[in-house]
Amino acid sequence: MHPWSSTQKRDYTIGQLMAESQAFPMERPKTWVKLHRAVPPCLYQMQGAHVMPSGPAASAYYYLRVTQENGQMAWTSPIWFE
């Protein structure tokens, strides 16, 4: 048993996590842990295509930047193509 963790085992089904967030207290330090509601794949998967130009000046870099419905953002590091 780690002194900074909860001593109770917690089991949640995928259905429970899809339905709502779950939270439980930790013993030390006195705090809570929250497991946010899971989202179905249709809300986090996407597909797309991009055709790169060809020729001697076709060297380029690309990155992906996304904005979630709640306003939070994420992006990849640049990917270079020559």
Image: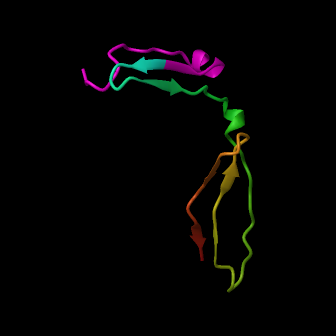
Residue stretch rendered in magenta on the structure: 1-23
Question: Could you say which is closer to the camera, residue 77 or residue 31?
Answer: 31
- Which residue is at 26% across, 24% downward? 3
- Which residue is at 65% across, 58% downward? 64
| Residue 67 image offset from top left, x and y in percent | 70, 49
- Which residue is at 71% across, 83% downward? 55
- Which residue is at 57% across, 27% downward? 36
Instruction: For the C terminus, give its image quadrant.
Output: bottom right
Q: Residue furthest front?
A: 30
| Residue 59 image offset from top left, x and y in percent | 64, 79
Is 16 a magenta residue? yes
Does residue 48 appear left or right of residue 19 in this picture?
A: right
Q: Is residue 57 above or below residue 1?
A: below
Q: Is residue 71 above or below residue 79?
A: above
Name the chief secondary structure element in magenta.
loop
Q: How many marks?
A: 0
Does residue 27 appear left or right of residue 42 in this picture?
A: left
Question: Could you say which is closer to the camera, residue 55 or residue 67?
Answer: 67
| Residue 8 image offset from top left, x and y in percent | 36, 13
Does residue 57 appear left or right of residue 21 in this picture?
A: right
